Image: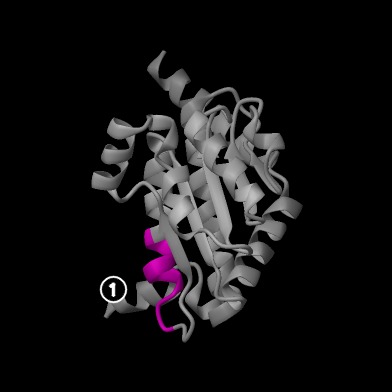
Amino acid sequence: MSKYKYTEYINTLKKTLENISINKLEELTDLFLECHKNNKTIYIFGNGGSGATASHVAGDFMKGVSYQLKNAFKVISLNDNMPGIMAIANDLSYDDIFIEQLKNTLKKGDIAIGISGSGNSKNVLKAISFANKKNAITIGFTGYKGGKLKTSVNLSIHAPVIDMEVTEDIHMVIFHALKQQIISKLKGNEFSMGKKYETRIAN
């Protein structure tokens, strides 16, 4: 029984990955590169595991992607300022924890990325709606049927699977693939696929 569950999970993960639109991933790459070229900022946010993904992505672009670039990527996770989040949630509403942060800094041409497995997280939707009104570029990462987020953004990256864990895995895989694609385009293939790290560790 246990062995079957592992096999079922892995097969579901592989099948879902095969159904991801490569054209949309290329569009995602282009948006990130354009944002970088124009010295704009990328804001990313989500709840629970999606929030952890947001923090992970911000870390990847701060160090792994931006290292040795003359113009670093500006990627900010709205999940990382815990005192601010708790103050907003306590004094206003948990639904406002992302939008209130965007009100302070979001500008036209910036990117706002909302991550929500269900696509219906109220705080994510509220922030995306604000970003749309500010003429920012909005991107949604979803699973299940996509919820309201899927149709509220300029670019929807949808994992077509009714499973939260697989959805979260797919999102992380996409962001890691995006990282390597951008490193390859900006630094060359020798920096992608961890080759430089492998050389450093081997020595």
Does the rendering let one see residue 188? no
Q: Observer-nearest residue: 158 or 104?
A: 104
Q: Is residue 147 left or right of residue 164?
A: right
**Image position, residue 23 (x, y; %):** 76, 54
Q: Residue at x 29, y 75 (%)?
A: 202
**Quadrant of the snapshot with the C terminus:** bottom left
Q: Is residue 165 left or right of residue 81?
A: right
Q: Residue at x 31, y 42 (%)?
A: 85
**Image position, residue 155 (x, y; %):** 69, 48
Q: Residue at x 59, y 49 (%)?
A: 131
Colouring: one colour
Q: Which residue is mark 1?
A: 201
Q: Is residue 61 magenta?
A: yes
Q: Residues within 10 Å of mark 1 (few under 14, many from 20)?
A: few
Q: Which residues are magenta?
A: 59-68
The answer to whether 4 is drawn above or below residue 98 in the figure is above
Q: Residue at x 52, y 48 (%)?
A: 173
